[in-house]
Amino acid sequence: MPPRYFKNDAPLARRGRSATCQKVKALLTPCADPRRQLEASLTRLVNDNPPAKCALGGGLFHGPVSVAYTFLVLQQLYPDLVIEDHGLGTWSSAYLKYAQDHIQSYPGPRIGKCGIMDDIMCLLAIGAASSKDKDMAANLCDYSAEVLDPGSENEFLYGRAGYLYLLRLIKASFMDDPETLQLITDTQEDVIDAILDSPRPWKWHGKVYIGAIHGAIGIITQIVLTNPKKYAEKLEAELAVLLTYQYESGNFPSSVPPERDRLVQVCHGAPGVVISLESIREYFPTLKEKIEKAIAKGRECILERGLLTKEPCLCHGINGNALALPDAEFDHFLTYTTGHEIKSMEKDGMLEKSSAPESLFGGEAGRAWTWAVADKGLDKRILGYNDL
């Protein structure tokens, strides 16, 4: 088993936002042209993990639906990009079709399993958003019965916070449909009210988590991004308490009471908290100084311990950690996520391979997303979490 991370002691890569690339002395990997790396990443994705090779299940987190969603979003950014003779929209449709062809094998939303991991809900959300299908939107809203059941929890991956992301995904497609828009808004408010009425601290499987995927910062982020004007003030005290949990190192504990300062990744630790804070900080003006301090300290920890040996990805890898950093450091981290560098890490026994190599949160699709962020100069957000 390789160590958890390797030392960040190479000079910063300097490549800017153009295809012009300056090699940095002593840096193992030459600075990378993000557009070329995006195309290489997508080419690997469709060749190494074609639809039929993807393990079924996983919603937006992993599996064919997560890949389809990635292609769908990238197609809007790169309408003319062709990968292996097909446009990105065609690839999105191919992965979606594979998931839909096996729809009978999915258990469907149920109490306690109704976040972004549910394929049926994700397929409805993608379908409603892309085709403006009001019936699909209504069907997604109907699943609020499972989401609102007292047996469902509040976190992002399996719970109510993840459902809020799916509702935001469809809402933008119905701004000119007052009836459907009102249905979506009412559903959002019902879910948020259920979360806010839940006993504190929020728990998942009996444990008080802090991070983006299972914990309080993920719940707060999804609520605030859904309706900041109505709910940010109500969550200010909650966020202020969360900020006090930060270790002296700059990291955040996975759960409280705090255990060993160990994990530095999006799902548990400073990266997920920093990325979340960056997307909601404007709605908490009275916490401005505390948030800025937390972000700065968190970034110090990420720079020191964030070059992880897990296969580069969004959830628990270098790509997700990179999104928490300023431009120069972001670019530097991405130089460790090229196909060449990943092969070198594997050859040196420094790579813990992903169990979902195709996926948005655990594999190649997420790497492609971060190259698009670098290429287009997008806000550093996690696709499927706080990009909407």
Image: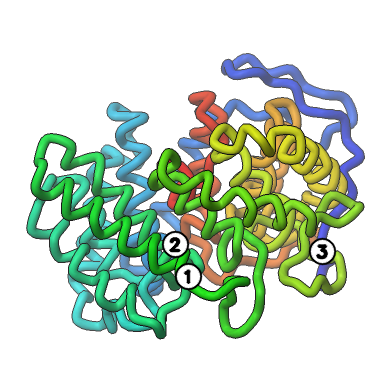
Left or right of 64? Residue 40 is: right
Marked residue nearer the N-terminal end (3 or 2) = 3
Which mark is nearer the camera, 3 or 2? 2
Any mark on residue 64, and which? none
Instruction: Please identify the quarter of the rendering in which residue 77 is found.
Output: top left
CB contact under 8 Å: marks 3 and 2: no
Q: In this figure, which residue is indicated by the disc labeled 2?
A: 161
Quarter assignment of residue 78: top left
Coloring scheme of the render?
rainbow
The residue lying toward the viewer, choosing from 190 and 219, is 190
In the image: residue 167, left or right of residue 382? left
| Residue type highlighted by circle 2 | Ala
Residue 206 percent across, percent down from the top left: 61, 84
How far is disc 1 from disc 3 in space, using C-alphas? Answer: 29 Å
Q: Which mark is residue 154?
A: 1
Question: Is residue 161 among what the camera can see?
Answer: yes
Residue 113, quarter of picture: bottom left
Q: Which mark is residue 4?
A: 3
Separation (CA) of disc 3 from disc 2: 29 Å
Amino acid found under the numbered disc labelled 3: Arg
For the residue labelled by badge 1, is the local secondary structure a helix, a strand or a loop? loop
Q: Amino acid at mark 1?
A: Asn
On the image, the x and y values in percent for residue 262 come to 83, 66
> The N terminus is located in which quarter?
bottom right
- Determine crowd level at label 1: few under 14, some 14-19, many 20+ residues with C-alpha closer than 10 A: many
**Mark 3 residue element:** loop
Classify 10 Å Cα crowding around label 2: few (below 14), some (14-19), many (20 and above): many
Give neighbour class at mark 3: few <14, some 14-19, many 20+ (Cα, 10 Å).
Answer: some
Position in image of residue 129 (x %, y %): 21, 47
The residue sitting at 57% across, 83% down in the picture is 205
Q: Indicate which disc, 1 or 2, sits on the residue closer to the N terminus.
A: 1
